[in-house]
Amino acid sequence: MKVPSSSPPLVRLLRPLVAAVLLTGLALALLDALSGGLRAAGTQRYVAPGGTDAGACDSAAQPCATLTYALGQAASGDTVVISPGIYTESGVTITRSVQIEGSGAASTILQAHADPAQAADRVFLITTDSAVTITALTIRHGRASGDYGGGLAVLGGHVTLSDAHVISNTAALGGGIYVAGGASLQLSGGQVMGNVADGDPLGGGGIAVYGGALTQTGATVIAHNRAAAGHGGGVYLVNGSAWLDGAALHHNDSRDHGGGVYVTADTVGHTARLTVTGGRLVENSAGDSGGGLAVTVNRSDMRATAVLSGVAVLSNTAPLGGSVHQASGGAITFTHGCIVGNSAPAVRRAPDALFPLQARATWWGSGSGPGGEGPGSGDAVAGSVDYGNFLTLPPPGCGSTDCDLSVRTTAPLTATRPGAQAITYTIAFSNRGPAPARSVVLTDWLPIGLTDLQVTTEGAPLTPTETWPGALIWQAGDLAPGAAGWVTLTGHISPVPGSAFTNTVAITTTTF
């Protein structure tokens, strides 16, 4: 998977040339050539649905039709501006430093195929030592079968992904995003949702970092991702580093370890390092250990560490360590947060663990402290966990109980005969918890081929907001305890006999 670095950027070449005291005529000629190249950089290229793949794409009045063609015209330092629309392109390869600017994630869609099950390649591939910025667009329906990075694969350089959505992509490793050794990704805002890692036993349904570096800032949502046959439903970190600041990881799932996040090392002398400040791990699940977080390595000459501060870990489930699990060469430090409502034991240090598991200055859902091997009635601990200085009152956002949002869809979505068929399905949503859910948003990614759509709502009030291509979005505002609502959608769909239709619904909130 390792890709050789490309030549150093021009800026690095210029620095020693400018600093030199004695410049030969050849050096002066080289400097002039490089300067000329720099003067030519910075051109804006344009892409729009009505464009034509011809010319330089450097006029908004004469845009090209595809991002692939525009990138072929671009030089390092150029910006590609993409107008609203759905662009079906796969295997878009970026080999130089460029900026790609969408017109908003809700209206600018880059997809590998209209039907995610039919996609034959990932959406984006970045292979060289370059600086790439991608903003304000949606990356969806990529598929890298037996490979890595269904939506975005970063094999080199530094990539900034800002206010972008990575949705419904699939790969063996890193269903949504993959970051390789030597590469780095800056993730700011946006969503990584509904992605699948189907490798056995690899993982990283949402994001996989394999020797690379991930830095996340802002209100990024990493949710409803799945490691179907491996580890790390939300994030899978091996040998590299990840810093998550304010992320909301919820409703991710893994077959084995680390429903929300899995941290490990697999190379002698390497350490995987996870740092989490603020944010939430909520209602993630794992089939084996660490519903919220699992940190483990299998040898004493490798290390995996996780440091969490001010994090709310709520209502996660796993047979071993509903919220947090530490084994063998893993090490976890958790402070000034809360661990509440997770399956028992909520925090588990395995018998083979080599290092302490510290969960200090933490609210456990009870003023008496943690249960299990602890002294109180809060979430249970097992395996000599250091729970010293536990909090007797909950910090902000960490009550003993919280809101409990649920959403479900009911509809007969299996085709039985050819031709257009009438279809009706209902989305039911509710807050089953005793506390309000703030700023609730309901999103329905519609079945492909649904036409003549009509929508009715009842119960808790919903306000339609922006309509994505292929999706409907409603604002529910603050949903009170016990509040519920229903959305009924009717239309027509033209099925292939025996086929199944997929309808994905998500509900999000700023509180859990």
Image (cartoon, rainbow, N blue to C red):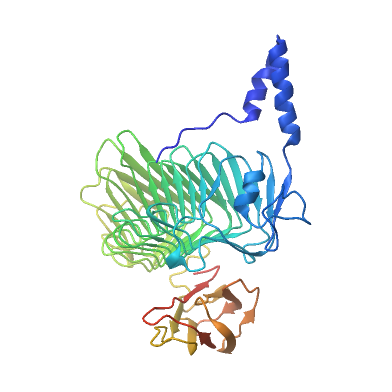
Q: Count how many numbered circles sit on residues in the image.
A: 0
Q: Residue 455 at what x, y percent from top left? A: 58, 87
Q: Residue at x 58, y 85 (%)?
A: 453
Q: Residue at x 36, y 38 (%)?
A: 271
Picture layout, residue 432 above or below residue 207: below
Residue 410 visible, this orientation:
yes
Picture layout, residue 298 above or below residue 150: above
Q: Quadrant of residue 471?
A: bottom right
Q: Quadrant of residue 64?
A: bottom right
- In terms of depth relative to the viewer, which is nearer, 375 or 151? 151
Q: Residue at x 65, y 19 (%)?
A: 16
Q: Residue 475 at what x, y percent from top left? A: 61, 76
Indicate left or right for 329 with 226 as reference. left
- In terms of depth relative to the viewer, which is nearer, 165 or 400? 165
Q: Residue 446 at what x, y percent from top left? A: 52, 77
Residue 483 visible, this orientation:
no
Picture layout, residue 313 above or below residue 459: above
- In terms of depth relative to the viewer, which is nearer, 147 or 375? 147
Name the residue at the left extreme: 351
Q: Residue 462 at what x, y percent from top left? A: 61, 82
- Position of the N terminus, as image quadrant, is top left
